[in-house]
């Protein structure tokens, strides 16, 4: 086992993805290398890569021409780049200059879904519901809530559509992202709600006593 202090000696990591959702490429350097479960990893100083977490999927990315998957390494506290299954990481050494790049199209799609998740969480809380779970993965995005007080509208389809219509209207009234970010969050966000092209909220479902709001969201065109 490598001691965390040794791993970190190359310098601190800057989490660039928290500052700029749309930065696609950066020239940086390797600050640490190590192994997880027998597989090599490399950490770069300017980390463009959002690792999976908080309901948001990991970015796809590259170090030079090698495809990588970012993973949060608990031992070192760093976001580390590893080869995807079946791939291999090129030999990298500490201090080496490297070009890091992300799949920007996937990033903007993830940021739109993640930010829309905050919006839906906020309108659910406005109803007095408590968030139970969230998932911002493409194709399966949903927010689930506990309902502290019985709501008889939830018992039939018309009532559920009525409640969903209230949520949609509340969502359109939220203008500023500030209202959505009461707690610090490690995800990637769109800068303004105007960057969301479309948020679609089909009629809510009730599953195992929880309200489930599935949704889709897309980013406005950036061209
Ligand atoms: Zn967030």
Image (cartoon, grey):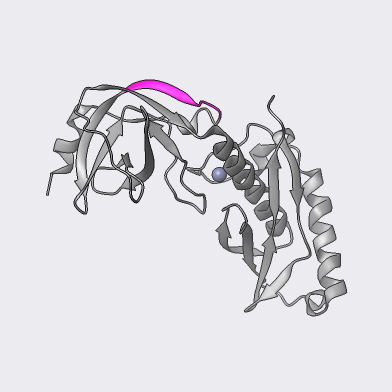
Figure quarter occupied by ligand 1? top right
Residue 155, picture quadrant: bottom right
Quarter of the picture containing the C terminus is top right
Residue 85 as seen in the image, left or right of residue 58: left
Q: Is residue 192 left or right of residue 163?
A: left
- The residue that appears at 36% across and 47% down in the rendered structure is 84
Say which of 211 and 195 sits in front.
195
- Magenta range is 22-28
Q: Position of residue 60 (x, y in %)?
A: 46, 40
Residue 76 pos. (x, y %): 24, 43
Residue 130, image quadrant? bottom right
Q: How many marks?
A: 0
Q: Residue at x 36, y 27 (%)?
A: 64
Q: Is residue 25 magenta?
A: yes
Front residue (pair 210, 112): 112
Side (left or right) of 191 relative to 91:
right
In the image shown, does 221 or 184 lie closer to the viewer? 221
Residue 51 horizontal/vertical position (percent): 42, 44
Kindly give the residue lying farthest to the front in the view shown: 86
Q: Is residue 41 left or right of residue 17?
A: left
Q: Is residue 206 visible?
A: yes
Percent coordinates x, y for residue 154 in the rendering:
78, 75
Residue drawn at point x = 55 percent, y = 38 percent:
107
Residue shown at 69% from the left, 43% from the top: 218
Q: Is residue 156 above or below residue 96?
A: below
Quarter where residue 34 is shown: top left
Q: Is residue 181 visible?
A: no
Residue 142 counted in the magenta span: no
């Amino acid at each position: 086992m490598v001691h965390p202090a040794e791993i970190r000696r190359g310098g601190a990591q800057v989490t660039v993805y928290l500052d700029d959702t749309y930065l696609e490429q950066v020239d940086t350097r390797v600050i640490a290398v190590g192994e997880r479960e027998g597989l090599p990893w490399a950490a770069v100083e300017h980390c463009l890569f959002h690792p999976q977490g908080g309901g948001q999927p990991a970015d796809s990315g590259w170090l030079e021409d090698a495809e990588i998957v970012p993973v949060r390494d608990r031992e070192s506290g760093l976001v580390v780049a590893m080869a995807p299954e079946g791939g291999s990481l090129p030999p990298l050494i500490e201090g080496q200059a490297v070009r890091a790049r992300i799949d920007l199209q996937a990033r903007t799609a993830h940021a739109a879904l993640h930010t829309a998740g905050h919006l839906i969480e906020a309108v659910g809380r406005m109803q007095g519901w408590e968030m139970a779970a969230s998932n911002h993965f493409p194709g399966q995005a949903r927010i689930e809530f506990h309902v502290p007080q019985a709501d008889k509208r939830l018992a039939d389809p018309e009532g559920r559509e009525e409640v969903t219509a209230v949520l949609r209207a509340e969502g359109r009234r939220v203008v500023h992202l500030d209202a959505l970010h009461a707690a610090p969050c490690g995800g990637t966000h769109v800068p303004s709600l105007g960057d969301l092209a479309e948020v679609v909220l089909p009629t809510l479902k009730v599953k195992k006593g929880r309200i489930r709001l599935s949704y889709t969201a897309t980013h406005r065109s950036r061209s």
